[in-house]
Amino acid sequence: MKGDVLYFDAERGIGFASGDDGNRYHFDRADLPAGFSPQKGMRIAFTPSGNRAGAIVPQGGIAAAPQTAVPAAPAAAGPTQAVAGRQARPAGAVPPVEAAPTRAVPSVAAAPAPGAPLAGARPLSLFGHFRSCVTAGYVRFRGRATRREYWGFVLFSVLAVLAVALAALILDASVGNLDRDEPIALAILAPLAVLALVLPSVAVTVRRIHDVGLSGWFVLLGLIPSVGSLIILVFALIPSQKRPNRWGEVPADVL
């Protein structure tokens, strides 16, 4: 996707861009090429992921601002020479001081306040979050994920595994595997579906922990028998931090 840079804070390394689809996206220094510092109005191409712009590539310079034409100064007149359109003045007279032409300063749109959710950004649906997690966010461990994104992924992951299991049972029944008590398709396809969702599940959990202001390494607490899953559940239920943290800006669909 292509768009324009709306704002970039070089000191903090965060910025915002407007996509050609009408949405706004946030990015940070990690999404920029090395040594590249975008400026307002610069044309860029990027890969959208939710409300984040990743893999940013500059597409050209900043459009030049309109220049105000400055009238050329008239040639110096002799002591008694008259300038066209003006009354002749005697030699030695001090010419009147003319006011310098004023230039209209183009209005500059106010940059969005750092940390504020992007105005006009449309939150993804629950299925949209699931689709983003299993595509662009499949192994994306940096950034933040809201409760809406996390639970959207969990909901449709369960539905996807159940759909695969049901399709496998139908396939086993059609070829007669259930008559021999050998549901081969179910035994193969259902575990494959679960295995395919392991990486995005870990990735979205890490981003959910980032969203509450903690290190993603806390995801390892889930390996503790019995209580580990309860700890991850608590992390998943904590509200998002409504301010920027070290893992990114406030997501647009904070609940």
Image (cartoon, helix red, strand yellow):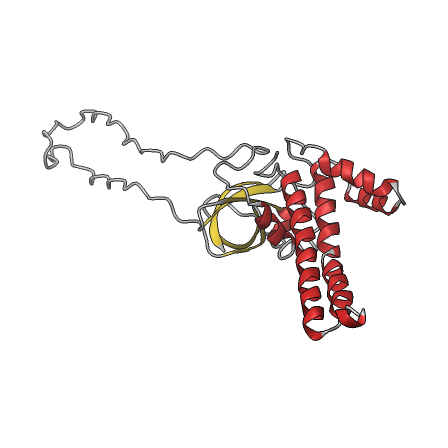
Check the picture and name the quadrant holding the C terminus.
Answer: top right
Q: Residue at x 23, y 39 (%)?
A: 73
Between residues 226 and 12, which one lies in front from this camera angle? 226
Q: Is residue 68 visible?
A: yes
Residue 27 image offset from top left, x and y in percent? 59, 45
Residue farthest toward the front in the current orientation of the protein? 179
Residue farthest toward the right in the current orientation of the protein? 225
Between residues 124 and 25, which one lies in front from this camera angle? 124
Residue farthest toward the bottom in the current orientation of the protein? 175
Quadrant housing residue 247: top right
Query: In the picture provided, is 6 more to the left or to the right than 143?
Result: left
Q: Is residue 214 visible?
A: no
Check the image and report above or below for 49 versus 172. above
Check the image and report above or below for 58 versus 220. below
Q: Residue at x 79, y 41 (%)?
A: 232
Q: Residue at x 40, y 49 (%)?
A: 63
Query: In the picture provided, is 10 more to the left or to the right than 234?
Result: left
Residue 109 image offset from top left, x and y in percent? 43, 35
Between residues 180 and 47, which one lies in front from this camera angle? 180
Between residues 62 and 184, which one lies in front from this camera angle? 184
Residue 89 image offset from top left, x and y in percent? 12, 27
Check the image and report above or below for 57 versus 96. below
Could you tell me how many numbered marks the image carries? 0
Query: In the picture provided, is 146 more to the left or to the right than 3?
Result: right
Q: Residue at x 59, y 49 (%)?
A: 127
Residue 219 image offset from top left, x and y in percent? 80, 45
